[in-house]
Amino acid sequence: MVAFTISHIFLVFLLYPFQYSSSLSSLNKGSFLSVEKHAEDVLVSSNGTFSAGFYQVGENAFSFAIWFTELRNHNPNNIVWMANREQPVNGKHSKLYLLNTGNILLLDAGQLNTWSSNTASNDPLELYLKEDGNLVLRELKGTTILWQSYDFPTNTLLPNQPLTRYTKLISSRSYSNYSSGFYKLFFDDNNVIRLDYDGPDVSSTYWPPTWMSSWDAGRSNYNSSRIALLDSLGKFISSDNYIFSTYDYGTLLQRRLTIDSDGNIRVYSRRNLSENWYVSWQVISNTCIIHGICGANSTCSYDPKKGKKCSCLPGYKLKNYNDWSYGCEPMFDFTCNRSESTFLKLQGFELYGYDGNFVQNITYKGCESLCLQQCNCTGFQYTYKDDSNIFECYTKLQLLNGRHSPSFPGTTYLRLPKGKNFSKQESVSVKDHICLVQLSKHYFTKPTDNLVRFFLWISIAVGGLEFVFFIVVGVCLNKTKKKSSANQNSYHHAILGFRRYSYYELKVATKNFSNEIGRGGGGVVYRGTLPDQRDVAIKRLNEAKQGEGEFQAEVSIIGRLNHMNLIEMWGYCIEGKHRILVYEYMENGSLAENLSSKTNTLDWSKRYDIALGISRVLAYLHEECLEWILHCDIKPQNILLDSNFQPKLADFGLSKLKNRNDLNNNSTFSMIRGTRGYMAPEWIFHLPITSKVDVYSYGIVVLELITGKNPTLMNIEGEDGEMTYNGSLISWVREKKRSQCWVEEILDPSIGTSCDLSKMEILVRVALECVEEDMDIRPNMSQVVEMLQNNERVVE
Ligand SMILES: *[C@@H]1O[C@H](CO)[C@@H](O)[C@H](O)[C@H]1NC(C)=O
Ligand SMILES: *[C@@H]1O[C@H](CO)[C@@H](O)[C@H](O)[C@H]1NC(C)=O
Ligand SMILES: *[C@@H]1O[C@H](CO)[C@@H](O)[C@H](O)[C@H]1NC(C)=O
Ligand SMILES: *[C@@H]1O[C@H](CO)[C@@H](O)[C@H](O)[C@H]1NC(C)=O
Ligand SMILES: *[C@@H]1O[C@H](CO)[C@@H](O)[C@H](O)[C@H]1NC(C)=O
Ligand SMILES: *[C@@H]1O[C@H](CO)[C@@H](O)[C@H](O)[C@H]1NC(C)=O
Ligand SMILES: *[C@@H]1O[C@H](CO)[C@@H](O)[C@H](O)[C@H]1NC(C)=O
Ligand SMILES: *[C@@H]1O[C@H](CO)[C@@H](O)[C@H](O)[C@H]1NC(C)=O
Ligand SMILES: *[C@@H]1O[C@H](CO)[C@@H](O)[C@H](O)[C@H]1NC(C)=O
């Protein structure tokens, strides 16, 4: 204690003369900020957005930091920079000096120089915090900047703060421990911006995925300027051609881009200091692909609803209950004796990296004995490769980056000692802090709400903010699309979603836009074939009125939606005036074509499946995703059928998303969207537009599906003479329903005679509920799904 004080006095003496600084806008030569006065000794930016000073990071531990000025308690989310993240200083006698030599020095009590700016100048200097969060040491006369915090980011970039070849972002160790963690974002030697896991024992790249070339990942490695920047409107551009726009792109908000301690890059936004942060973008939605996330000897499984889950492998136990990064350790002793080992089969389980051997065209027994030959082989992966028709064997030296997914083609065999029963149930499993968000079903009944309030609302509802969007986006963006095939392609698409094409590529793919297959309000659709032989439908939009950023934001929302009943977008093109969208090609055309075709082959079960599939995707868009994804134009023309006659909803909301901001504004939203014959009465009566407009249109489509009668034609013919808006098909069905044997009477003759009438009856009943005049009486889409699914189970 005495030594402490003496050394402190000694220091102060050394650094004399200092006057106490109470100037909060800047620090001049010879003045200091002191940790005891951490509440007052704060540099504040001119408009008060940012503050810099001593920030308490633990008991009696402080770091010199910059943070978004806050109202309430300390919130780790506000910190944007730290001078001494690895080495906090004592809560007594620590100071930040601007020395007369021109150096900034952070002194811990009793210890010299925890951190310094390594600057020197004889001129008068000032250290001040700019309104953009940049802490700058500059000459008072002249404009020379000697040092700025923007050049030394920690885990966060602020808008317009470049990431360069000289800088990198390193995650914090955990949410509350600001020391450097395991994940970093930087430009590699090939000019590509990437994410690495740099763990205590091993390191590896996880984004973009190593198994694909940077070119396939949509990156260019020719541009050696190595600069990436998030602008203040929410668009991120990197010189390797990696570009994204946040979901709230276009608004001036407080924003920060952070590499979180779980290795994901997220952009957070908020309006001002009295609001909560929400996640407006994240790079990786299936967080199980992040290396090291569950530690060694573990497995990560991802459920879009529940988030990520870590478990120890059978026979292993968790090392540290508070921190999964320590992984799991074996509960047994390894033995080299071949006859004492046995293998446990883990289906749909993949381990990345750390292979001892890789052998192709080998039998299972061969692979097993290969593993047994190596004392340190902990298991092996035995995979059948579809495309080359051979078996592959990978023996594993370490069990790292384990990932479980029912759709993985591979099987892993875990080496365990014989005679012990390590059943799978013995594994410990710990969920991370993800809560399921239930969105308000009536969001749009308050048309004054806006997107930001919406996010705020969920933030408040959840009480935390870190994982809010994780769920909302995770649910929407990460549904694994294909149930069965998990080949590299779908894997690829699940991770990267889609890519940007050049106009030339698409021109070649469509043979100069020669094969027109459709035409709509938004543009013309052509058939084409990509160089990798995938068939595509290419939609060339008419003159786009909106700005490029907005277009990209839309594309990035749509392109990352994933549902088996949603048409998949593979990419887009923006070049000059061209705005082109690239979709998967649907062999069986649209439902409308099928219904009107003379050779209609849609039997009752296909029709039932179509109704069920469309209800599922609408439930997904309305309820699992952000509720503002209303389709607004459900009709048979927009329902496409794949080779198995599975329905895929297309054209979803592009026209609506184009004017997404209108959703919040009743007057412009009252501009009628949709197609006559399928539109809900709300449009006519200027009632609030909710997801129930889609429910209504869905009901009409189902009625058309069953009766084969086109509601728009019925209206024109005025079959029932009433000419009520859009009511004729409905009232015709309602009327028929009064008689006996009504189901047979209304059925489309082309359905044929072998038909499950009870199922058709359920469909009609559900459809009639959906087309209730009063939107409050209509069921919501998940109720529809439930009614149809329950019925399916009972009947089969
Ligand atoms: C600071 O606030 C004033 C008034 O609100 C505004 O005009 C000015 O642009 C702001 N300055 C910065 C750097 O944001
Ligand atoms: C923070 O993490 C570092 C690095 O892992 C560790 O050395 C330190 O003890 C941790 N601090 C706290 C307070 O847990
Ligand atoms: C390289 O990237 C920078 C930053 O994105 C950009 O300004 C520049 O035009 C690019 N250069 C080339 C040759 O594409
Ligand atoms: C923050 O923004 C909200 C919504 O725009 C506004 O009502 C509030 O007054 C703002 N608070 C401050 C402190 O600026
Ligand atoms: C993981 O298990 C292996 C044995 O399979 C063991 O050697 C290693 O130490 C374990 N890793 C950790 C982090 O405990
Ligand atoms: C291996 O184990 C078997 C059965 O436990 C035993 O009979 C045999 O002697 C062991 N071999 C060696 C080399 O230890
Ligand atoms: C795999 O083995 C089969 C038969 O043993 C052989 O015909 C085939 O060429 C082998 N394939 C490769 C890639 O080695
Ligand atoms: C595994 O064992 C082999 C010899 O059987 C040895 O060459 C290799 O270094 C070992 N690897 C590890 C990671 O221990
Ligand atoms: C292993 O244990 C599980 C329950 O812990 C039990 O169901 C199973 O039958 C056991 N298997 C063997 C081979 O003992």
Image: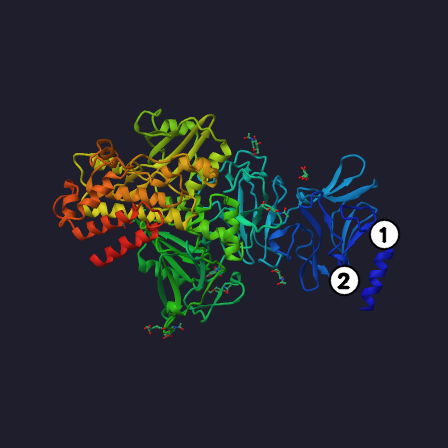
Disc 1 is placed on an element classified as strand
Ligand 2 under 8 Å from disc 2 Cβ:
no
Q: Nearer the viewer, residue 336 or 148?
A: 148
- Report the amino acid beneath label 2: Lys
Where does residue 122 sit, x and y in percent of width and height?
Answer: 84, 41
Q: Which quarter of the figure is the N terminus placed in?
A: bottom right
Q: Quadrant of ligand 6?
A: bottom left
Q: Looking at the picture, does residue 225 appear above or below residue 576?
A: below
Q: Which of the 4 image quarters holds residue 693?
A: top left
Q: Is residue 659 visible?
A: no
Q: Looking at the picture, does residue 365 appear above or below residue 684?
A: below
Q: Nearer the viewer, residue 545 or 221?
A: 545
The residue depicted at 87 percent of the width and 56 percent of the height is 13
Q: Is residue 721 left or right of residue 693?
A: left
Nearer-N-terminus badge (2/1)? 1
- Report the amino acid beneath label 1: Gln
Q: Please report contact status of discs 2 and 1: CB closer than 8 Å, yes or no.
A: no
Which residue lies under the disc numbered 2? 92
Which residue lies under the disc numbered 1? 19
The residue depicted at 57 percent of the width and 35 percent of the height is 224
Where does residue 245 sit, x and y in percent of width and height?
Answer: 51, 39
Q: Nearer the viewer, residue 744 or 620?
A: 744
